[in-house]
Amino acid sequence: MLSYVTIGVTDLEKSEAFYNQLLAPIGAKTLIKMDRIIFIGKSMAEPMLAICTPYNEEVQNCGNGNMLAIAPGSKEKCDAMYQQAIGLGATCDGEPGQRIPDVFYGAYFRDFDGNKIVFNHFG
């Protein structure tokens, strides 16, 4: 159903390096690179993450309640990718843990621009 999700960033090159390094363990990399937007994913046929500088040239900001969820495939991968994000300079917004017993596991962080992201696993 989803084609791609876009988040605003202030430094396109820094964010591209961050997300390429962070998402490499699940097979994602830069697929399309243009002046103000970069698409990162596994293939053009699967959902992608787009990072961009805002089209209106105003300051990037994060919406209250907006969050990107990425499912790497297991709780262990959630933990490892969360630790990698923190190691790359992201900030903790909820350490890895079971949120809903036997249903939802999540590890929350914010990137350099304050975008909230969770690595999650259902089941």
Image (cartoon, rainbow, N blue to C red):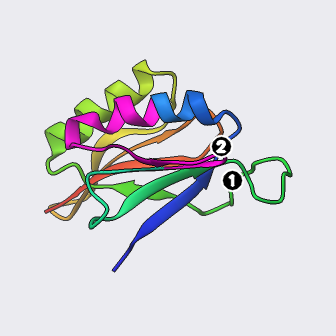
Relative side of 29 to 98, left or right: right
- The residue carrying pointer 2 sits among few (fewer than 14), some (14 to 19) or many (20 or more) residues within 10 Å by Cα, namely many
Residue 114's x, y, as percent? 64, 41
Q: Residue at x 70, y 48 (%)?
A: 53
| Circles 1, 2 touching at the beta carbon (< 8 Å) | no
Residue 62's label in the rendered image is 1
Is residue 31 or residue 96 the one in the foreground? 31
Which residue lies most toward the bottom here?
1
Is residue 75 or residue 56 the one in the foreground? 56
Relative side of 109 to 81, left or right: right
Residue 104's x, y, as percent? 25, 60
Q: Which residues are magenta?
A: 18-38
Query: In this picture, is 98 found above or below 76?
Result: below
Give the residue at mark 2.
9
Residue 82's label in the rendered image is none
Relative side of 34 to 21, left or right: right
Q: The residue tagged with tag 2: helix, strand or loop?
A: loop
| Residue type marked 2 | Val
Q: Residue at x 46, y 30 (%)?
A: 18
Residue 118's x, y, as percent? 40, 49
Is residue 59 or residue 53 the one in the foreground? 53
Q: Residue at x 36, y 29 (%)?
A: 21
